[in-house]
Amino acid sequence: MALCLLTLCGSAYAQTTVWQPAPGHTQIPLWPGVPPDPKPMPGPEHTDTGDKLIGGKTISGVTNVSQPTMTVYAPTGTNTGAAVVVFPGGGFAGLAMDLEGTEVCDWLAPRGITCVLLKYRVPSTPYEWKCDCRPHNFGLSMPSLQDAQRALRLVRSRAAEWHIDPHKIGVLGFSAGGYLVAETSTNFKRHTYAPIDAVDKESSRPDFAVAIYPGHLVTDEGKFNPNITVSRETPPTFLLQAEDDYVDGVNQSLAYFAALKKADVPTEMHLYARGGHAFGLRPTELPITHWPTLVDAWLRTIGIVKD
């Protein structure tokens, strides 16, 4: 929910144009025509730059996304064959495209991992948005889940072209994007939209999953979200959260970890005393910001990346 914290809840911000990746990278439309189940937007897509600093830098977020895209960052290091589809957070009201998007790809590409940054449709919430930014009882995040499933299928369909191992395609998300990680990891057999072309014959199941300070996994009554149907087919999962997470609460990761272990899914979880919420990959004085090294090691542990 980083975007809510920085732009939607009272902070000043500067509006610019539709979000565009850095030169040398091109956005690829997810759908050949109009996306399924189109919904009216509050206004045109635009990018906001918040005034709050994380790691000494501002955060850029995009809102009112009606035309979802993905941007491919090819490996700049020796290609490992692995790929990661990245889901930025933003409370399903917007997307923190640099803090939890482009900066993730800048970390993964030098490690030989293809990074696919998903700009999924937002707002995409089945509940009334409240600027206290606290979790509420939450269903499936249509149409964001449709976009996430389509992105995984697209990447898998173009694996040979992009020099990707189709059995090493994972997902990584933050906050609301962490919930999208759980959704794609557990609802890959659910038909969220009618197939439209040969791409939709591909599987939308991720081969591994990384959820960083995820949200929406616990209901207001303290129960595990029934829409996250964990099974033995759920992919190996990495979880990380701070105990002082003031937005979603550490109980989110704890509940998901318990459900994963009950289903005998290989899982690694790291909890830190301090870190708050929406820190991304930006280094601070807190140990939690070194979490990318833990993911590096985990990817080797589960055999996605080899030394």
Image (spheres, grey):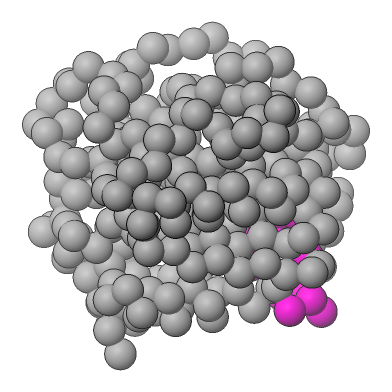
Q: Position of residue 227 (x, y in %)?
A: 47, 28
Tell me if residue 277 is in the magenta stretch: yes
Position of 91 with respect to 143 (left or right) is: right
Q: Quadrant of residue 82?
A: bottom left
Q: Position of residue 63 (x, y in %)?
A: 63, 31
Note whether 14 is above or below 128 in the view shown: below
Position of 103 with respect to 243 (left or right) is: left
In this view, the residue farthest toward the bottom is 307
Tell me if residue 79 is in the magenta stretch: no
Position of 280 with respect to 263 (left or right) is: right
Q: Residue at x 53, y 55 (%)?
A: 257
Q: Residue 195 versus residue 54: which sits nearer the camera?
A: 195
Q: Residue at x 35, y 80 (%)?
A: 300
Report the label total.
Answer: 0
Note whether 148 is above or below 263 in the view shown: above
Q: Residue at x 53, y 41 (%)?
A: 179
Quadrant for the C terminus in the image: bottom left
Q: Which residues are magenta?
A: 275-287
Q: Residue at x 60, y 25 (%)?
A: 138
Q: Residue 76 versus residue 225: which sits nearer the camera?
A: 225
Q: Main secondary structure of the magenta part?
A: loop
Quadrant for the N terminus in the image: top right
Residue 63 visible? The answer is no
